Amino acid sequence: MSKMKIISGSVLIVSCLTLILLTVFVKGSSYWQGPPSDHFKENRFINNEPDNTFSDHLKWLWEMETVEWPEWIDDPPQASSVAQVTVNRMRITYINHATVLIQIGGINILTDPIWSARAGPVSWLGSKRIRAAGVKMEDLPDIHIILISHDHYDHLDIPTLKRLTIDNKPVILAGLGMRVHLKDFSGVVELDWWEEYRHKSGTKITFVPSRHNSGRGIFDKNKTLWGGYVIKESQKRLLFLGDTGFGEFFEKLATKFDYFDLAILPIGNYEKRWFMKSEHMNPDDAVKAHKMLNVEQSVGIHYATFNEHPEQSIHAHEKDLKEAIKKHGIPESRFWILEFGEGRELSTRLQGIRPEIKKS
């Protein structure tokens, strides 16, 4: 047996034992018990497209061929984030993984916040961080809204949420069933796909479909709802997707929303492709989504933060994004990869009423 197969077999055993351990954290929990719908049947949420099976997971773990990543990366410091931006302005700061600071119309929104050293149920178990968050938590401005895309440990980090809510009292938006994980927090609002939340500032946020899954143990698979968010403030419209494969839901988004000023799209952790295509977009998928959704400016997220079974090199997303941009014929300036901690404000031509843009 090859060394790689021995390693893969060890990963499989450890992963199975980990899933058994995680069962302790979810057993007996009371999950969503709402009426059936086109995406909720037999007490579980579903994708309307093919999903990976348990056998697929085992096959993927057995075939896993990880590549070496650095033990640690020190990123150059970036300029301090601003306290807020005013109406008709929008600023985005990439912090790490799927954690983004969105500043729009006087409010500050944080997505899938994680500052922990590992993405896991306890401090010593889970995928290990290979770089610091691009912004220290103590340097954040006041946070008014937190968006949670789904309950996987690298997107729903309870220790980070507890620290963030000590001084701030943000509204926490999440999918149906997520209150079981957030019972210790106030201000939690659960949303179904296409359901809208209106903040007191006037900003409207709609929970929208994505192609992914949920679960923090063995028996809670798809017991909570996953998704993305559309943020509407004045003339600005923004899309955030935490984790997703490319899917038919993009057509529904394009039908319901005729343009986006900004799309925050995952572009990492996409190999092996036969397995990941239903869960994580690759850069080519992200550029296709950029064109399909009539996006003015996209930014990539979800890469090079945690050593999560990497089967592509740490910089593969950069190379693959350049190739996808060239292939699909869009300017490189229309799809950003930001440095960790880097903030940018949308160009001045987007600060007034948006001009009409033809569909791609």
Image (cartoon, rainbow, N blue to C red):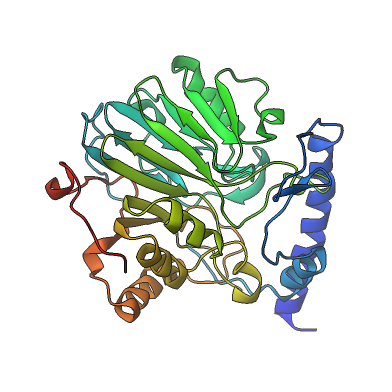
Residue at horizontal 21 percent and vertical 37 percent from the top:
89
Quarter residue 327 falls in: bottom left
For this orientation, the residue located farthest to the bottom is: 1
Q: Quadrant of residue 158?
A: top right
Q: Residue at x 72, y 53 (%)?
A: 46
Q: Residue 244: tell me if it is visible.
A: yes
Residue 285 vs residue 188: left or right? Answer: left
Between residues 12 and 40, which one lies in front from this camera angle?
A: 40
Horizontally, is 61 left or right of 189 in the view?
Answer: right
- Of 40 and 145, nearer the camera is 40
Q: Residue 222 at x, y = what percent?
A: 73, 48
Residue 139 lies left or right of residue 175; in this view the side is left
- Please state, as top left, top right, bottom left or bottom right, where the C terminus lies in the image: bottom left
Residue 73 visible, this angle: no
- Name the residue: 82% across, 57% down: 16
Q: Give the quadrant of the N terminus.
A: bottom right
Q: Residue furthest left?
A: 348
Image location (x, y in percent) of residue 39: 70, 50
The quarter of the displayed image where residue 343 is located: top left
Indicate whether 225 appears above or below 8.
above
Residue drawn 68% across and 72% down? 64
